[in-house]
Image: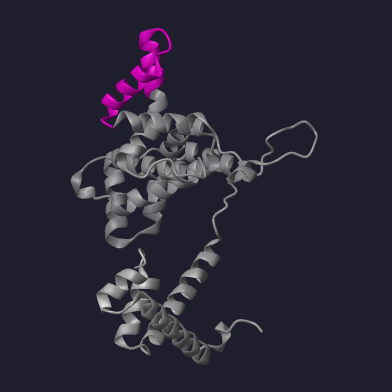
Amino acid sequence: MQDSARQEMVRAAMKAPYLERDEEQELARRWKEAQDQEALHRITLAHMRLVIAMASKFRSFGLPAGDLIQEGYVGLLEAAARFDPSREVRFSTYATWWIRASMQDYVLRNWSIVRGGTSSAQKALFFNLRRLRAKMQRAGGEAMPSGDLYREVAHALKVPEKDVALMDARLSGSDTSLNAPLKSDGEQSSERLDLLVSDDPLPDDVAGESIDGERRTAWLEQALETLNVRELKIVRERRLSEDGATLEALGESLGISKERVRQIESRALEKLQECLSRKHPELRAPA
């Protein structure tokens, strides 16, 4: 929101008349029962002071006041849509929660690239940590040790101490560009991004290898079907097993010499190579 538009909105809000209880109830009934747009306009305009006043409480987060007011207005409209005049409470009392919730959600979305809190406990910690820290330090007369501060805040908000320490670290720092230089001596320097270089394969390469591996495994299983029972046993235990059985062990198992095992293995591998080359020419070794 531009400054001129925001100033105009503030002036209009300050000029809007206050609503008496009976008038407010009547307008709320007209809006709820007949969707009277004029009634909605008068209710929201009369309570824009509340939105503007609450926006000032969030200015310490460094976000544009005009945007906070807009978000508060969204909360004000939500309150008007949900307000039940039959409960006979003032609209300002009901709307305060919705206005604050709308502004808090805006702050959490925009204060940092990384969202500051998702659960209700994290939100309470985000918005109350600095206030509680200042209050406790004033009461103690001097800066409290971090451990004592975290313990006191955790007890007050009923959250784990580690969550308090993590939120304090996030609130104490600011977002930094990965393209920010590590040195400023006028020479060409590295960037923070350079420290994040990984030697791991790219995701595309990993996916490609996985797909190719599954395809080759399927081709091998088809080729193994061409072997007889003894050939299949020898190939699986000699070539496809992690331990890899010895020629002597297989010879004893099959009741043949180790030389005979070697001959059967050699013949089986030739059969596999021939089958794979015939069905998948791309696997042939270049001449």
**Is 212 rendered above or below residue 109?**
below
**Is 40 rendered above or below residue 279?**
above
Horizontal side of 22 relative to 106 (left or right) equals: left
Horizontal side of 124 relative to 203 (left or right) equals: left
Horizontal side of 5 relative to 61 (left or right) equals: right
Residue 164 or residue 9, whichever sits in front: 164
Looking at the picture, how far across and down is residue 278, in whole percent?
A: 51, 92
Name the residue at the left extreme: 87
Looking at the picture, how far across and down is residue 236, in whole percent?
A: 35, 75
Looking at the picture, how far across and down is residue 287, in whole percent?
A: 66, 84
Q: Residue at x 50, y 30 (%)?
A: 60
Residue 268 or residue 77, whichever sits in front: 268
Q: Does the magenta stretch include residue 285?
A: no
Q: Would residue 218 be seen by someone viewing this image from the given angle?
A: no
Looking at the picture, how far across and down is residue 227, in whole percent?
A: 36, 88
Q: Which secondary structure dominates the residues rendered in magenta?
A: helix
Residue 226 or residue 43, whichever sits in front: 226
Q: Residue at x 38, y 51 (%)?
A: 77
Name the residue at the right extreme: 186
Q: Which residue is drawn at 38% across and 90% down?
A: 226
Q: Would residue 29 be seen by someone viewing this image from the given angle?
A: yes
> In which quadrant of the rendered view does residue 53 lie?
top left
Q: Is residue 135 magenta?
A: yes
Horizontal side of 242 relative to 53 (left or right) equals: left
Task: Please provide the residue range marked out in magenta.
Answer: 132-159
Name the residue at the bottom extreme: 278
**Is 62 rendered above or below residue 285?**
above
Residue 42 or residue 227, whichever sits in front: 227
